[in-house]
Structure formats: structure tokens, C-alpha cells
Image: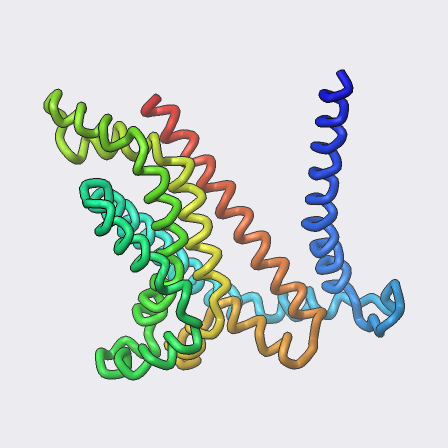
Amino acid sequence: MKGVKSSSISERLVIGILLVVILFPLCLLLVWSFTARWPWPNLLPERFSLRGWQQLQMESTSLLAVLRNNIFISLSVSFLSIVIALLTAKVYVGQSKSIQKLIRFLVVLPLLIPATVFGMGIHPAFIRLGFANTSVGVILSHLIYSLPYAALLILNAYSGQIPKLEEEAHVLGASAWRTTVTITLPLLSPVLLVAFVMSYIVSFSQYFLTQLIGGGMVQTLATKIFPYLQANDRTIASVYSLVFLILTVALFALVEMGVKRYQQRHA
């Protein structure tokens, strides 16, 4: 009983710490969105204001256009990351250990290269190819940094029993498409959900590559927030950050609902 009680207490302690770590910054963000003045070292704001939300209302038309573009870019990056990662996993399973190590290294390689170095190196090539200052160029640049997260998750999940089940389905006469839809995707759906959301967040929050490759012609929420942060206008920056958070949580909920329905249909 003592062991059970101590385990229960430790679990509650961990959950409590996680809630504090997650909720405290969110509460600060919410307070800042209604704050007119909060000088250091005051524990509470001196004045409150609706300036941030009024600014959001004033820019609602342009903001909607930015959000549509941002969501399109991030969804495109997430979808391409999932497809490429899944194809990579299928190739990865049938290779020797040395080739598998090489594939893993190539997958992780973009994470080892700073975004500034990568961006400055690829920008001249994108100018020559006509991808600079376009959404296509931004999607391709985001894909380089989103793909490793999706690929590592899917490689680890796919390397288990899934290839054997696929092989059995092929022996029984199932086509490659039917095998993917009825076996691979349902079994991988939880991992695909995480990989999709991870890729989306990496793309949605990317500032430097968007600004460099997009050349100021491609606007996203990150490029919208940064000038306010640079000007130390935390009120408006907090409002836009809350919009960012709400959209991300909403996307995660929608994708999770879609995955659960897909699993129920193919259960």
C-alpha cells in the first residue's frame, strides 16, 4: 500500500509540475494581451487596456489573408513530410544495417545545420530556380526542417510488425493501395498524427526561412508577430501569440478526430 501511495503522490506531483510549467506562461500571455503598462519589478500590471484586441480587430481582414496563406503553407509541408517519411520508411526496412544508418544520418542532417547557414546557402539557388519570393520556395525550405521530425517518428514506428503484416496481405492477394489503406495507415495513425502536428508547428512558427526565402512577399503569422516583438510591444505580440496557440490546438483536435474516425472505420 505504501508503494502504491508513494507512486500516486509522485504521479500527482509530476502532473502538477507539468500543469504549472504549461499553464503559467499561458496565463502570463493572457494577462499581457490586456495590459497597457507592466513595468519591472511590479508583480501586477499598472494599467489594463483592450488595445491589443482592438488592433487585432482593425487588422482582421489582412490577418485572415495571412492566416490562410500560413495554414496553406504549413498543411502542405505537413502532408509532404508525412508522404516522404512514409516512403522513406518503406525503403528503409529492406536495406542492410549500414544503409539504414546512412538513411538515418541523412534524415537527421538538416537538424545539425543552423537555419541561417542553410537559408543563406539555398537562397541563391532558389533565386536561379525562380522559387525565391514565392510560397513554393517557402514550402520547400520549411520541408527541409520539418521532414526530420516526421521521418524519425515514422521510421521507428514502421520498423516493427507492419512490414510483415503488409507482406502477408500481399501474399493473400491485396494490392499495394489496399494494403496501405487497410493495414499501414490504421496501424500508423497515432504516429502519423504526432508527425503531422510536429511538422505543422515547425512550419507554422518558422520566421527566418520565411522572411529570407519569401523576401517579404510571403507573409505568415510569425512574420506578423516578429516586428511587434522587435519593437518590444508585448501587448499586441501576446494577442497574436494567443491566435497562434488557438489555431494550433484547433488543428490538433481536428486531426485527432479525423484519425479516430478513420480507425473506427477500419477497425
Q: Position of residue 130 (x, y in %)?
A: 24, 79
Q: Confirm whether residue 87 shows in the render.
A: yes
Q: Hey, which residue is sitting farthest top in the picture? A: 1
Q: Position of residue 136 (x, y in %)?
A: 30, 68
Q: Quadrant of residue 12?
A: top right
Q: Residue at horizontal 36%, vertical 58%? A: 108
Q: Is residue 38 left or right of residue 185?
A: right
Q: Confirm whether residue 210 shows in the render.
A: no
| Image: 59 above or below 201 | below
Q: Position of residue 83 (x, y in %)?
A: 28, 49
Q: Quadrant of residue 131?
A: bottom left
Q: Residue at horizontal 31%, vertical 77%? A: 122
Q: Position of residue 224 (x, y in %)?
A: 54, 72
| Image: 165 above or below 191 | above
Quadrant (top left, top right, bottom left, bottom right) of the C terminus:
top left
Pick the residue in front: 19 or 162.
162
Q: Is residue 8 left or right of residue 62?
A: right
Pick the residue in front: 243 or 207.
207
Q: Is residue 22 left or right of residue 262?
A: right
Give the number of marks: 0
Q: Residue at horizontal 28%, vertical 45%? A: 86
Q: Residue at horizontal 44%, vertical 55%? A: 200
Q: Hey, which residue is sitting farthest front in the picture? A: 98
Pick the residue in front: 9 or 201.
9
